[in-house]
Image (cartoon, rainbow, N blue to C red):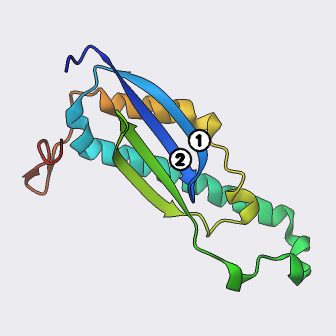
Amino acid sequence: MNREELTKVEFLLTLEGNIIIQRFFNVKDFNFDALNSIDLNDVVSEICYEISSDLKTKTIDYLLENRNFYYDIDDVENETNLQEEHFLLEIKVENRIFISRIFPAHIYHPKVRYTVDIRPKVRNILARLTGVLSSDNLELDYLGYNLKNVRK
């Protein structure tokens, strides 16, 4: 494949199968070696950590703003009915998932986890992903193993 071409990439964040955000973006000079790089793993892990940190902050803010609300026990989410929910972040190239991360959603207040809005951060997230996916300076060795040809 000519690296000068644009490669279509998909960024997808879901909560239990429900799409929170889906963006398609093009990467010029796509480096397929990036799919097996430590750099890509690090960027995706950082993105998940940032989303989690933002949700934690919003949960704390919500609980502080509504602290008097919790005196009425009937309105609090019943712990026995709590089901484990998870966010799923996927990055796809040519309709093929090449990296995904799952992280817990049920640990955040329902009012926060069901109203996730990462739109203000999307431009930065996509720029970081594009930077890694088009980079020629990648870390492709891990614990003495060459990751370059692990999966194609």
Q: Furthest residue to the bottom?
A: 80
Q: State whether residue 64 is above or below residue 52.
A: below
Quadrant of res 27: top left
Question: Where is the C terminus found, in terms of image quarters?
Answer: top left
- Please tell me which residue is depicted at 26% across the width and 40% down the height of the picture: 35
Residue 4 lies left or right of residue 20; in this view the side is left
SS label for mark 2: strand
Quadrant of res 62: bottom right
Q: Are marks 2 and 1 in contact (CB under 8 Å)?
A: yes
- Please state the horizontal and vertical placement of residue 43, each as a whole percent of the image: 38, 44
67 or 151: nearer the viewer:
151
- Please state the horizontal and vertical placement of residue 111, each as a whole percent of the image: 76, 60
Q: Furthest residue to the top?
A: 4
The residue beneath circle 1 is: 21
The residue beneath circle 2 is: 13
Question: Where is the N terminus found, in terms of image quarters?
Answer: top left
Whichever of callouts 2 and 1 sits on the residue coming sooner in the sequence is 2
